[in-house]
Image: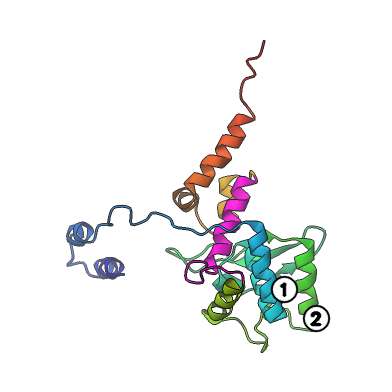
Amino acid sequence: MLKAALNLAADHDQSITSRRVWETGLASLPDAEEARNVILPDDQIRQLVAHAYEHSREFGLLLETAAMTGARVSQLARLEVQDLQDGAAPRLLMPASRKGKGAKAMLRRPVPISSALANRLAASDCNRPTTAPLLTKPSGARWSKSDHSRLFAGAAKRCDFDAAEVTMYALRHSSIVRQLLAGVPVRVVAVNHDTSVIMIERNYSRHIGDHADALARAALLDSTP
């Protein structure tokens, strides 16, 4: 944060002619960017979603949509009723995150979802304006930044998980790895999860290696006479 503040000051103050001091003094520590992502198998994710539905339909829909799409809660909270396309190939028009630099050129990206989830989402938006939030709290209000934290921790504990280790982001990490191991190209995985190929390669390199090994193995030469 300090480095970002100093760079912002340099962008607006022409008297600052060099950034070398803080680029050297605030250089990243070795292995500081090593990924420690929690990846959950599908059966454990289904347990989490089931416990969420036991709490309330609204919280269940939030968790199921997060698990299905791998989207951040901040994106899910900005989904509107009109963003659900529940035809033969259902999908959500997912709002772009507010992460990264500069303005987002594309405000929404289509993300595929299952027909079962699309039906549950469609049943929850009856007689509501098209611009109303698609996912709401039991009170009907839009989910805000940390509304889910305590509820998710409770669901994690009921699954015998360490709530300090398994957070909502585990659903995102698991979605990314699931698509990689299913053979989805890295570029498509990055687009579906509103991130970059560089970040996918940096944080999920081991799983990309597993994926690449499976693809290469299918193309091995059969040297049997």
Residue sitting farthest toward the top: 225
Q: Which residue is drawn at 67% across and 59% down?
A: 43
Kind of residue at disc 1: Gln
Q: How crowded is mark 1: few (under 14 residues within 10 Å), some or many (20 or more)?
A: some
Q: Nearer the viewer, residue 219 or 157?
A: 157
Report how many numbered discs are placed on residues in the image: 2
Q: Which of the two discs, 1 and 2, labels the residue nearer the N terminus?
A: 1
Q: Which residue is drawn at 53% across and 78% down?
A: 149
Residue 130, quarter of picture:
bottom right
Q: Label 2: which residue?
A: 126
Q: Residue at x 64, y 71 (%)?
A: 63
Quarter of the picture containing the C terminus is top right
Q: Residue 82 carries which label?
A: 1
Q: Where is residue 99 in the image (x, y as percent from the top left)?
A: 47, 66
Q: Which residue is drawn at 27% across and 56% down?
A: 29
Q: Where is residue 92 in the image (x, y as percent from the top left)?
A: 69, 65
Residue 75, quarter of picture:
bottom right
Q: Does 111 appear above or below 73?
A: above
| SS under mark 1 | helix
